[in-house]
Amino acid sequence: MSDAKPTSRSVAQEEIRQLRAIKDRLDDASIDVILRKARSHYAWTDRPVPDALLRELYDITIAGPTSMNTCPARFVFVREVAAKERLAKALKAKNIDKMMAAPVTAIIAYDPNFWTHLPFLFPHEDRRPFFEGKEDHCEVTALRNSSLQGAYFMIAARALGLDVGAMSGFSNEIVDQEFFAENGWKSNFLCNIGYADESALFGKLPRFEFEEVCSIL
């Protein structure tokens, strides 16, 4: 009998087999919660969102895939009134009350220099030459993958029982000047987080049918 220790690769393969054996798909109610019947919210109760829940939200979000495990997204959770007043400078007038009322507003941002962390995030080989000196490629990669991570973030929040309301009606330049002048990060979009006041909802807007926007080739 061999006493060799299992490799990290074999452990990973066994973990996914066990996971699929436990649950090969989500039940319909769970899918309804995270996407199918979920809604974007614009009004909020005063129920607080504890730090421990924000940490759990991040831990789930960061597990989502990104190209070469670049993980370019950065998250700033804006909760205190003074910080929200700083953020309000960047918002269009119609969005200020929504943001101020939410228990937490997350700035979903990205680090254009994400590639400098690849020795830690992708230790198999040095992938920094793919990005070094290629500013446009870095920008496209960071924006695309931080948007993916922002979507994971919203789904994870719903899975944890939180409600979300994403916002793009703001000045990225002002947000970046106000919050990221020292580290060079760039804002992507904002997302209000909390427990919604459902009385502000209106009818769900239409979506395309499969045949209108999909092809099977």
Image (cartoon, helix red, strand yellow):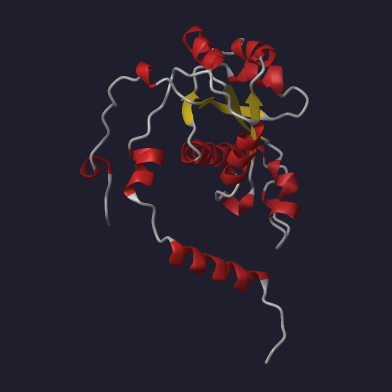
Looking at the image, is 193 positioned above or below residue 216?
above
Q: Position of residue 31 (x, y in %)?
A: 37, 45
The answer to which of 70 and 192 lies nearer the viewer is: 192
Location of residue 104 by image quarter = top right
In the displayed image of the protein, which residue is found farthest to the bottom?
1
Q: Residue at x 53, y 36 (%)?
A: 150
Q: Position of residue 213 (x, y in %)?
A: 27, 41
- Disc tally is 0
Location of residue 50 by image quarter = top right
- The reply, left or right, for residue 55 in relation to residue 65 is right
- The reply, left or right, for residue 107 in relation to residue 33 is right
Looking at the image, is 148 positioned above or below residue 124?
above
Q: Position of residue 191 (x, y in %)?
A: 53, 26
| Image quarter in which the N terminus is found | bottom right
The answer to which of 159 and 126 lies nearer the viewer is: 159
In the displayed image of the protein, which residue is found farthest to the top?
93
Q: Residue at x 55, y 51 (%)?
A: 65
